[in-house]
Each structure stands twice: as structure tokens, then as C-alpha cells.
Image: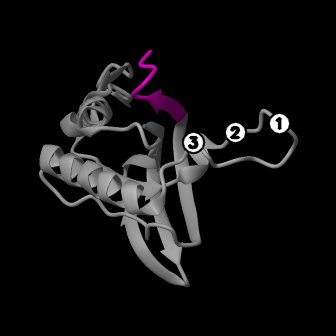
Amino acid sequence: MRVLLQRVSHANVVVEGETTGQIGAGLLLLVGIEPADTPDDLAWMSNKVCNLRVFEDDAGVMNRSVLETGGQILAVSQFTLFGSYRKGNRPSWMRAAKGEVATGLFDEFVARLAAQLGKPVPTGVFGADMKVSLLNDGPITLMLDSKNPE
């Protein structure tokens, strides 16, 4: 499982001209699922996202988590995080989980995040053509990988 995490001042996702999810200050997550992902990957990732200290404390040091700040999370499915460009110039998506697998895992991940936050986590629409807008705060952008935790 891969998540591209961005600390944002605000973010939203639009599908066919309609806003399906939006947040104020918090985290925008672009979420990629691969077939090998398990509930353990979801648990590790949701705990890491919720507890990652990327928000500033009163001294201006990144020492607070989204849980501590009361921030929001917007999660958007993003199969292209598992794109391979090893051969040629046209990416292959073979490592990304098929929709019937990825949808359930993505929904479970979002449910875990919402339970930890104690509030709903808005999303895009799985498999749709989505337009994501954000104001990256910092900028802070991190790539998290449950199979290669750093």
C-alpha cells in the first residue's frame, strides 16, 4: 500500500462538476492499493497517517499529528502510484490492484481513518475521473509505503 501524503491548508475533489469531498487544514492522501495488501497494511498505514507528526507546535517545530491538531483527512484513490515505467515510456499499471479488490480495501482504510479521527473522512469516487485541488502547506509531501516503511 502506498500513500502520497500532503499537508494542506485546504483540498477538494470534484467528479463530473460535483464536489465529492473537501477539507480545511489537514492531510490529503492519494492512496494506491496493490494485490498483496492485507488488513495489516491498512492498520499500519492508518496508524502512521494519523500519528505522523507533520504539524507545527507552538515553538514552530513539526511535532503534532493530525489527531492532535483536530485536522481533517481527504482520501483519494490513486492506482497510478503503482505505475511502472521500467520498459518504454508508457506506464504499466500491472502492480495496482484491480477495482474489485482495491475498492474494498480502500473503503476499509477510510473506515479505519474515520474511526481513529472520530469524524468522517471524505473521499473522491473510486475509479472516476477526478479533479483534485489543494493548497500544499509547507510544502510537506511524503511517500509512505507499507511494504517499505522508512
Q: Is residue 30 magenta?
A: no
2 and 3 marks in contact (CB < 8 Å): yes
Q: Identify which amino acid the numbered label 1 is placed on.
A: Lys
Say if residue 24 shows up in the picture: no
Q: Identify which amino acid the numbered label 3 is placed on.
A: Arg
Q: Is residue 145 magenta?
A: yes
Question: Can you say whether 31 is above or below 124 in the image?
Answer: above
Q: Is residue 86 left or right of residue 29?
A: right
Say if residue 50 shows up in the picture: yes
Q: Identify which amino acid the numbered label 2 is placed on.
A: Ser
Residue 135 x, y percent position in the rendering: 54, 52
User: Residue at label 1?
Assistant: 87
Question: Can you say whether 92 is above or below 131 in the image?
Answer: above
Image quarter hosting the C terminus: top left
Q: Which residues are magenta?
A: 140-150
Mark 1 or mark 3, earlier in chain:
1
User: Residue at label 3?
Assistant: 95
| Residue at x 27%, y 53% (from the top left corner) | 110
Which dot marks residue 84? 2
Residue 86 x, y percent position in the rendering: 78, 33
